[in-house]
Image (cartoon, helix red, strand yellow):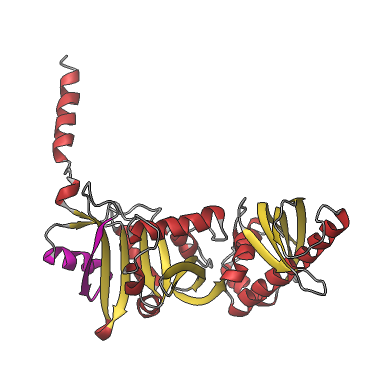
């Protein structure tokens, strides 16, 4: 018993140090948004759920301004009836303007150092004002805007064309020597909110975007995935639309051994099923399936080549080619990479396999 006494005392002391929070006694933010306003001030918005049995999905938005993002939370808490905490935050939204003015290094440094926030919190760029997005009332939804937005991004990542992103992954890509990060973009059209593309970063700023039509190929370049939708036009007289649902997609990278003229071949492999076709042909015909596969391969190659050429022109590397080269050649330095990357011979090869043809015509 004497041996157990110190353990019991230590347990009591540790428990007494904890600061339990009753959910009704604090404002627990589930989403945060930041806009840049006049005089270079930061406006922060916090989506706070209202926990009442008869008010499912009800919430309030608390806002405040300050000269820095880190001080906005304190500014809002000073005028709120309860302290604003971030322990339930699922998503943080930044306007393009605030990223341009402040930079993502400074914006994410505060988030990374905030002990209440988890590393898997979602980061999102907003076209236009974050305030307009935060104050949108989701139609046909009984959840607050914070939960709606986080569900929107997660759904795109899990079953759509959105690449996996969160605070941890973003910082990993940003801090890597020569690496470039990316984040999803949300845009408001009327009263609807949607993922409109991917923002590409280099040295703290947004330098380019991947539009929604290219997101499937971009996702395939950066990660293997099992879900996603690819739409293209068949090379026939009617330019028929074909929609393919991915069952398994991935990419392999083959690097040359040449020191003087390094090159890379990127091989895209897509296995999928036809989700929709505007043709009246019987798609159980193997000859027609082969035609669709060949046209899809040509379209994938064309689209991926265009993306890679644009990345080389801007000298950005969102898909991490430098690290793939470094794995092959340990002598590859960042300076050497910067000099050879823009003019490197990078070839795309695509392979499409249509496994099922359950279509609607």
Classify residue 339 by image quadrant: bottom right
Q: Is residue 100 left or right of residue 344?
A: left
Q: Is residue 320 above or below residue 226?
A: below
Residue drawn 28% across the image and 53% down it? 115
Q: Nearer the viewer, residue 98 or 139?
A: 139
Q: Is residue 264 above or below residue 312?
A: above
User: Can residue 164 be seen at all in this image of the molecule?
Assistant: no
Q: Residue furthest right?
A: 287
69 within the magenta span: yes
Classify residue 270 by image quadrant: bottom right
Residue drawn 73% across the image and 65% down it? 278
Q: How many marks?
A: 0
Q: Is residue 227 left or right of residue 252?
A: left
Residue 335 locus on image (x, y percent): 58, 72
Q: Is residue 200 left or right of residue 82?
A: right
Q: Is residue 323 left or right of residue 152?
A: right
Residue 186 locus on image (x, y percent): 45, 69
User: Can residue 43 be seen at all in this image of the molecule?
Assistant: yes
Q: Nearer the viewer, residue 283 or 91?
A: 283
Residue 258 locus on image (x, y percent): 76, 65
Say which quadrant the N terminus sits in.
top left
Residue drawn 82% across the image and 52% down it? 284
Say which quadrant the C terminus sits in.
bottom right
Q: Residue furthest bottom?
A: 39
Q: Nearer the viewer, residue 264 or 348?
A: 348
Magenta segment boundaries in residue numbering = 58-79
246 within the magenta span: no
Residue drawn 26% across the image and 70% down it? 44
């Amino acid at each position: 018993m004497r041996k157990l006494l110190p353990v019991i005392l230590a347990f009591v002391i540790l428990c007494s140090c904890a600061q339990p929070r009753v959910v009704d006694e604090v404002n627990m933010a589930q989403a945060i948004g930041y806009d840049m306003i006049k005089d270079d001030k930061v406006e922060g918005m916090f989506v706070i759920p209202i926990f009442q049995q008869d008010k499912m999905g009800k919430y309030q938005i608390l806002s405040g301004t300050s000269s820095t993002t880190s001080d906005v939370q304190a500014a809002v808490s000073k005028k709120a009836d309860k302290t604003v905490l971030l322990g339930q935050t699922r998503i943080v939204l930044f306007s393009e303007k605030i990223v341009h003015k402040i930079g993502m290094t400074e914006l994410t440094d505060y988030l990374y150092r905030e002990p209440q926030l988890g590393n898997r919190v979602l980061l999102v760029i907003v076209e236009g004002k974050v305030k307009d997005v935060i104050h949108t009332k989701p139609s046909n939804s009984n959840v607050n805007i914070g939960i709606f937005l986080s569900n929107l991004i997660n759904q795109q990542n899990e079953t759509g064309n959105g690449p996996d992103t969160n605070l941890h992954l973003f910082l990993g890509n940003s801090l890597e020597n020569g690496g470039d990060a990316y984040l999803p973009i949300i845009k408001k059209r009327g009263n609807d909110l949607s993922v409109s593309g991917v923002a590409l970063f280099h040295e703290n700023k947004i330098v380019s975007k991947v539009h929604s039509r290219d997101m499937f190929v971009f996702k395939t370049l950066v990660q293997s995935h099992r879900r996603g939708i690819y739409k293209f036009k068949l090379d026939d007289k009617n330019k028929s639309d074909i929609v393919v649902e991915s069952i398994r997609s991935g990419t392999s990278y083959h690097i040359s051994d040449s020191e003087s003229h390094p090159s890379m071949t990127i091989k895209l492999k897509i296995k999928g099923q036809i989700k929709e076709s505007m043709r009246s042909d019987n798609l159980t015909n193997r000859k027609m399936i082969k035609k669709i596969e060949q046209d899809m391969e040509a379209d994938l190659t064309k689209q991926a080549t265009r993306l890679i050429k644009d990345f080389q022109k801007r000298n950005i590397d969102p898909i991490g080619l430098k690290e793939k080269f470094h794995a092959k050649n340990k002598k590859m330095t960042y300076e050497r990479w910067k000099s050879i990357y823009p003019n490197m011979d990078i070839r795309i090869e695509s392979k499409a396999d249509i496994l099922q043809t359950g279509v609607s015509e």
